[in-house]
Image (tube, rainbow, N blue to C red):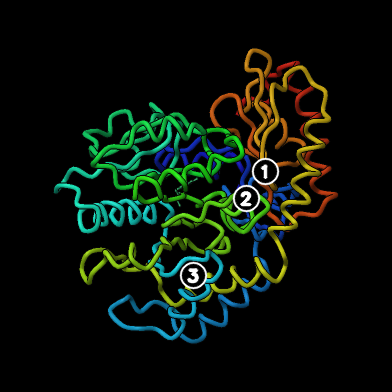
Amino acid sequence: MLPRNLIDREIRFGAQNYAPLPVVLSHGRGAHLFDIEGRRYIDMMSAYSAASFGHLHPRLVAAMQRQLERLDIVSRAFHSDNLGAFYQDLASITGLDACLVMNSGAEAVETAIKAARRFGYDELAIPADKAEIIVAAGNFHGRTTTIVGFSDDPESRRGFGPFAPGFAAAPFGDAEAIEALIGRHTAAILVEPIQGEAGVIVPPHGYLASLRRICDRHGILLIFDEVQSGFGRTGRNFCFEHEDARPDGLIIGKALGGGLMPVSAFVARRSLMDVFSPGSHGSTFGGNPLAAAIGREAIALLRDENLAERSRVLGEVLLQALRAINHPAIVEVRGKGLWAGVELDVSMVKAKDVCLALMRRGVLAKETHESVLRLAPPLVIAEDDLMEAVAAFRAALDDCAAPSERYAG
Ligand code: PLP
């Protein structure tokens, strides 16, 4: 079938809740994706970090296949023989004590919110239904109604209220502003250590450690959402490891599923996880044997292939190369590890147009908001591919400086 027909069918029978680039992918391997005509692209976004290990990593595929020959999904109504080991691996790599496995990132965020609120009532003597969680302006934690309720992105919220109360927002990167919001009903601070969707916003160094100290001082919980920043993306296994800032609760997802299926988790100190009792929370699919097998292999791969260090080293190469591009449309290059945001001057060029031009040049990336090109390639990407992508970006900026109708998607 022609690409246009395939796209039209998606549009005709699907919800229009995304605006994909006009490319129809049919296979992928490592850091490369291929469209239905066999054209190769360098993947510079890795499915928002879900494909951080690259596409179809042979070890992940083998682990999935091995599990598929033994046992599929049995629900948490019974024990299964690899769930305990998965928990232990997660506890070991995060330095925390106990886990609750879900599927999507948003579900793991909801799990963290429930845990924080119940901890607030049971352990911090917050009056019933008064618990408050402090979040950061510009946050992105997923798409459930509770979560979009504390987002400040108008299109995420419009028409979806009424929203749940119990959240207050402070500017991102400003620990003092967060502390000023803490009151007698505050149970927790919940932030992304680097804000991805907001445009790869890196807070000042020391912010995470300050939050840790503030939470200790006030006896409240620190929860980091590392759904996007975790698993080596920023040059450490978890972004909080850049500072002395181990949280009480950690939310992870995306790469944990190895790009093969949705696997997320809330990992926490024992006393925090112990707020959950049978019947208080759950998921039919969360922690299923297939998810556990893939998650265990993903954790092993992260360690065996030293991917966080690879991300740190290649990330420096990427940021340096991007900063070396001397183009008037670039306002700022920021990032950490293999995760970069390029802020563009929208009066000269729109990030979406750059993505279209990049696509024509064999590189797939995605803008966030109108002005930011976000780059987050698989951590296994070869340096040559990375440099090819940067060269394509340089050329794409020139393509867009002379706008052309042919790029209109
Ligand atoms: N939290 C963060 C920081 C994210 O970046 C995302 C998704 O981009 C989520 C949560 C939601 O994850 P999911 O789309 O798997 O629900």
- Work out whether mark 2 precedes mark 1 in sequence or the reverse, and give the earlier one: 2
Q: From the top left corner, tell me how far across and down residue 110 is, in percent.
A: 33, 52
Task: Specify the amino acid type for callout 2.
Answer: His
Kindly state the secondary structure of the residue where label 1 is placed.
Answer: loop
Does the rendering let one see residue 261?
Answer: yes
Task: Name the side, left or right, on which 26 lies relative to 40.
Answer: left
For this orientation, the residue located farthest to the left is 128
**Disc ID at residue 336:** 1
Element at label 2: helix
- Residue depicted at 33% across the width and 56% down the height: 111
Q: Is residue 200 visible?
A: no
Q: Which residue position holds label 2?
A: 242
Crowding at label 3, few (<14), some or many (≥20) Cα neighbours within 10 Å? some
Q: Which residue is mark 3?
A: 91
Label 3, secondary structure: give it: helix
- First of labels 3, 1 by sequence position: 3
Question: What residue do we see at 63% from left, 37% from top?
Answer: 374
Q: Quadrant of the C terminus?
A: top right
Whether residues under marks 2 and 1 lie with C-beta atoms below 8 angstroms apart, the answer is: yes
> Please, is residue 191 above or below residue 221 in the view?
above
Q: Earlier in the sequence, mark 3 or mark 2?
A: 3
Tell me whether circle 3 and circle 2 mark residues in contact (CB < 8 Å): no
